[in-house]
Image (cartoon, rainbow, N blue to C red):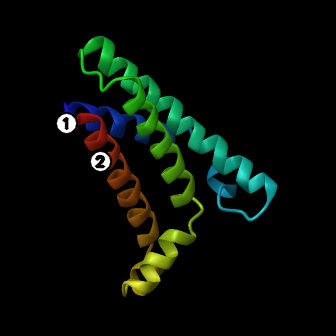
C-alpha cells in the first residue's frame, strides 16, 4: 500500500507545485507580509486538496484506503510541512548549516526544497500504510 499511496501523493504534489500554482503564489509565498502568508496558505491548501483527491482515487480505484483519521492526519502533515518548507528560510538555514553555500549560489535551493517535500510525502505514505 505504501508504494501506491506514495506514487499518488507524489503526482498530486507535482500537480499542485507546478500547473496548479499561480505565478503570484510562486513569487510571494515566502514574503513576510499578509499577502505572502495568504499566497503560502492557499498554495499549501492546493496541495491538501490535490492529495485528498489522490487519496480518494486510491480508495475508490485501487481499493487502497488507510482510513479516514490516518488520511486526515496525513493531509494535515502534508499541508503543514509544505507551508513551512515554502517559507524558504528552513531550506536556506539547512543549506547554510550543512556546508551547501556554493550549492545555494548555483540554484540548489530548489532541489533541496523538492527533496524536503518528497521526504514529507514519504512520511505521510508510511504513516497511512502502517
Up-down: is 93 above or below 59? below
Q: Residue at x 51, y 60 (%)?
A: 85
- Depth check, front residue: 72 or 125: 72
Tell which residue pokes out farthest to the front in this image.
69
- On-image quarter of the C terminus: top left
- On-image quarter of the N terminus: top left
Which residue lies under the disc numbered 2? 122
Up-down: is 68 above or below 79? above
Which residue lies under the disc numbered 1? 3
Within 10 angstroms of label 1, few (less than 14), some, or many (20 or more) residues? Answer: few
Local secondary structure at mark 2:
helix
Percent of width and height locating residue 107: 45, 71
Percent of width and height locating residue 45: 59, 38
Q: Residue at x 66, y 56 (%)?
A: 27
Percent of width and height locating residue 30: 65, 61
Measured in 3D between alpha carbons, the distance from the residue under mark 2 to the one under mark 1, in whole angstroms, is: 9 Å
Up-down: is 2 above or below 82? above
Residue 19 seen by the camera: no
Amino acid at each position: 500500500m505504501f508504494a501506491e499511496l506514495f506514487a499518488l501523493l507524489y503526482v498530486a504534489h507535482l500537480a499542485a507545485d507546478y500547473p496548479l500554482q499561480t505565478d503570484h503564489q510562486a513569487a510571494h509565498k515566502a514574503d513576510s507580509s499578509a499577502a505572502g502568508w495568504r499566497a503560502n496558505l492557499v498554495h499549501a491548501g492546493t496541495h491538501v486538496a490535490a492529495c485528498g483527491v489522490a487519496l480518494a482515487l486510491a480508495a475508490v480505484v485501487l481499493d487502497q484506503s488507510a482510513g479516514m483519521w490516518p488520511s486526515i492526519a496525513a493531509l494535515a502533515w502534508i499541508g503543514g510541512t509544505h507551508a513551512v518548507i515554502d517559507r524558504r528560510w528552513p531550506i536556506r538555514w539547512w543549506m547554510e548549516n550543512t556546508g551547501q553555500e556554493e550549492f545555494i549560489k548555483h540554484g540548489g535551493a530548489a532541489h533541496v526544497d523538492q527533496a524536503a517535500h518528497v521526504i514529507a510525502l514519504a512520511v505521510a505514505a508510511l504513516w497511512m500504510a502502517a
